[in-house]
Image (tube, rainbow, N blue to C red):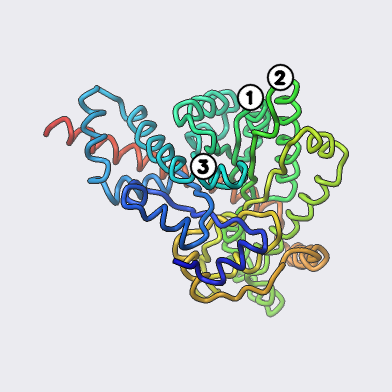
Amino acid sequence: MTPPLPLVELTQAGVSIWLDDLDRQRITSGELASLISASEVRGVTTNPTIFAKALSGSTSAYADQLRELAAAGSDVDGAVRALTTTDVRDACDVFRPLWESSYGIDGRVSIEVDPRLARDTDATILQARLLHGVVDRPNVLIKIPATQEGLPAITEVIGSGISVNVTLIFSIERYAEVIDAWLAGLELAQARGHDVATIDSVASFFVSRMDSAVDSRLDAIGTPEAAALHARAGLASARLAWGVFQDALAQPRWAALKAAGARPQRPLWASTGVKDPALPPTLYVMGLVVQGCVNTMPEGTLRACARDGGFSGDTVSNTQVASQAVWDALEGLGISAHDVCQHLEDEGVQKFEVSWQELLDSVSAALQDARLT
């Protein structure tokens, strides 16, 4: 089956389309493999919310493994780790041919460390290594949140030769720190004798959540000037982040690592499903087209792109001045980028902790049911 033209256009423009969703039914039914061949999907990202939804929405798909875990006396944390790593391992196998044909760039599947560890550097490092070993696939990415405590963990985990997806990035300043942590990790890996050509990384910059937070503040201001800035902060922030990325690749520090075979830490546009139904569903995809990025999107957004199109080429290059003007105007209205981004980071960690607890509760109940049958 030939993929829809808009999805082909995105791929040809250098955008790697990843699916922000995973459950066991997608894997076992062949749907995930079909998305690769028919919808240009080149990777998968997961998070605690996605796993909580998968386990609560299709318990039957996990019934056999839950019975096995119950019979073995597994506790709930061990069961959650077994269930989620099984899905990620199997998805890695589905993507393995693409990973090989793209020379390790695409065909990646992400799994996140326990979000309750987001403020604990040492525990994050230990679990990242554990997850990497349990999944035991070369195309897995371990997700580490870009909290202040996550930054040294990113360096250490990459320095251990493990590929990392840095998640929950909102501010330009924090993104610059993430880039520094990634470079330091590659330098550490090189010093320890790892082949840096085998270490991949992406940096997940969240987009639609930025608009949700800023637009609520604009609505509270209620002036025509505020209304004119509605739904502009997310794209502006992502485009400014691209400028930071380009500046980093122009530095001698990166040139030395590149000469050793290292690959760039690609910016990944995350949270690209629109939160405001009044906005075009493809806004955060077609508005962030540039060679060398990743866009991870929910299935609804993927289908909207295939259906509605709207591809108009590169929409990121040469947008730095206009994007900075958006934030200058927002700051002029009293909307602080620092305050918004800190709120979003704290909220993001909290939401994932809530989802993780829901996942634990769901699995605990399922284990109990399995023990009674």
Q: Can the viewer see residue 328 in this picture?
A: no
Q: Position of residue 357 (x, y in %)?
A: 38, 39
Disc 1 to disc 3, C-alpha distance: 17 Å
Residue, disc 2:
192
Would you say the residues marked 1 and 2 are in contact, meaning their CB atoms lie under 8 Å apart?
A: yes
Q: Secondary structure at mark 2?
A: loop
**Numbered label attached to residue 52:** none
Quarter of image, res 200 = top right
Amino acid type of disc 3?
Answer: Ser
Q: Secondary structure at mark 1?
A: loop
Residue, disc 1:
160
Disc 1 to disc 2, C-alpha distance: 8 Å
Chain-order first, disc 2 or disc 3: 3
| For residue 223, above or below residue 169 | below
**Numbered marks: total:** 3
Amino acid type of disc 2?
Answer: Arg
Where's the N terminus, which quadrant? bottom left
Which residue is pictured at 60% across the width and 41% down the height?
104
| For residue 215, above or below residue 176 | below
Amino acid type of disc 1?
Answer: Ser
Q: Residue furthest bottom?
A: 224
Q: Position of residue 173 (x, y in %)?
A: 75, 46
Disc 2 to disc 3, C-alpha distance: 25 Å
Q: Is residue 235 left or right of residue 191?
A: left
Where's the C terminus, which quadrant? top left
Pick whichever, 59 or 16, lies toward us: 16
Q: Is residue 241 left or right of residue 125?
A: right
Chain-order first, disc 1 or disc 2: 1
Pick whichever, 30 or 281, lies toward us: 30
Which residue is pictured at 74% across the width and 25% down the height?
190
Residue, disc 3:
110
